[in-house]
Image (cartoon, coloured by chain):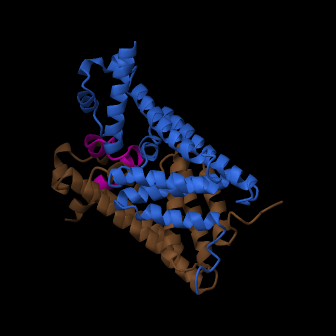
Chain colours: A brown, B blue
Amino acid sequence: MAAAQTTREKIIHKGAELIHLKGYYAAGLQEILRKSEVPKGSFYFYFKSKEDFGLAIIDHFSSIIEALFRRCLEDRSIPPLERLDHLLNSHLSMFRKTGYALGCPIGNLALELAGSNDRFRERIKTAIDSLISLISACLEEAKRDGALSIGADVSDAARFIFHGFEGAIMHMKVARSHEPIESFKRYLSDYLKGKPAHKKKSG
Amino acid sequence: MAAAQTTREKIIHKGAELIHLKGYYAAGLQEILRKSEVPKGSFYFYFKSKEDFGLAIIDHFSSIIEALFRRCLEDRSIPPLERLDHLLNSHLSMFRKTGYALGCPIGNLALELAGSNDRFRERIKTAIDSLISLISACLEEAKRDGALSIGADVSDAARFIFHGFEGAIMHMKVARSHEPIESFKRYLSDYLKGKPAHKKKSG
């Protein structure tokens, strides 16, 4: 049983790598199995269907990203708003390692799969909702500490941050540069510090 | 020559429809040709390669979206900041027609293709840069009119808006709902009106 789990996990790990690189449909099952060093015929021993495999891949990416969000946003040793900065910097370090080429696996799969498969869509929606909740909880804490005085809807603000971050990652992937994320960081920082578009920075 | 162009355009139109629905790799060439009612063998008469076809598809989507951006953001009959709102509402109307299922074709292709094909990536980057420039020009106008007093970098603010919008569209596609765009609109409006996160809306 332990060995069976190891093989299943090996397929998921290699599959996730290839899907992150190429996308879900472009990553062929045969290539995934070859890279996993698993015999071609045994895929359906570990997964009921290609869809079942896809769901496992989404869960795999979600759990990695959610763990990173938790590690940064629930770190009680630093103030809440610094944790957000820490989250962006942690992502930047990861993105740097792959030359800013791969982007957010959940964002990639969201756009590739949500239109064509409802089970994938629902699973990705759940993952995104969890990430937004973690940002929301961090903002709530900042609000309790008096570091942030958002009016009615902290979850709207959390969505705003999540949307901007995903869009910046998309732009980074296309520009192959850290600049879109840096630009997002500057604006987010001004926004959270209460420097709106209206307030003159200079002149 | 006119007939040849018509056939080429027919392939691009049907191809674009299918690619918007399914993604680039999931939309098979045979299905595109069947829907275009073009004989299977004649694809390479109109396109040098599948890549050449992909570039034509990116150009097709870019020109449609850029035209919508220009129609809204260069409409001198209304104040610049209202044009941004008009742009978001125009997109919402389009998204509504397809049940919020398809999202932004350029965003979709950005995440699907940028990691694996540099010519696609460069072409999508050019498209995104054009859209950000149009937002930037609109913000510059608002600044000249005194409706907006952004400090040093209007193009940073334009990027911030573009990033948020693309992220909100991604969320919309996954949630199959207009709510993420509505949430983005509320926050963008507060941001542009100078209501930062810091300022209390209530209590």
Q: Position of residue A130 (x, y in %)?
A: 40, 70
* Residue nearer the viewer, B79 or A111: B79
Residue appearing at x 24%, y 48% in the figure: A38
Give the residue at x 23% y 53%.
A51
Q: How many marks?
A: 0
The one nearer the camera, A128 or B172, is B172
In this view, the residue in front, B78 or A7, is B78
A2 displayed left or right of A125: left
Q: Is residue B179 left or right of residue B137?
A: left
Magenta: main secondary structure equals: helix
Residue A99 locus on image (x, y percent): 55, 46
Kindly indicate the quadrant of the structure image that contains residue B61.
top left
Question: In this view of the protein, can residue B30 be seen by the observer?
Answer: yes
Residue B109 x, y percent position in the rendering: 43, 42
Q: Which stretch did the figure color magenta?
A: A11-33
B169 vs B19: above or below: below
Q: Is residue B131 left or right of residue A38?
A: right
- Residue at 41% of width from left, 28% of height from top? B51
- Residue located farthest toward the top when viewing the structure as drawn: B1
Position of the C terminus of chain A by quadrant: bottom right
Q: Nearer the viewer, residue A9 or B75?
A: B75
At x 57%, y 42%, the residue is B70
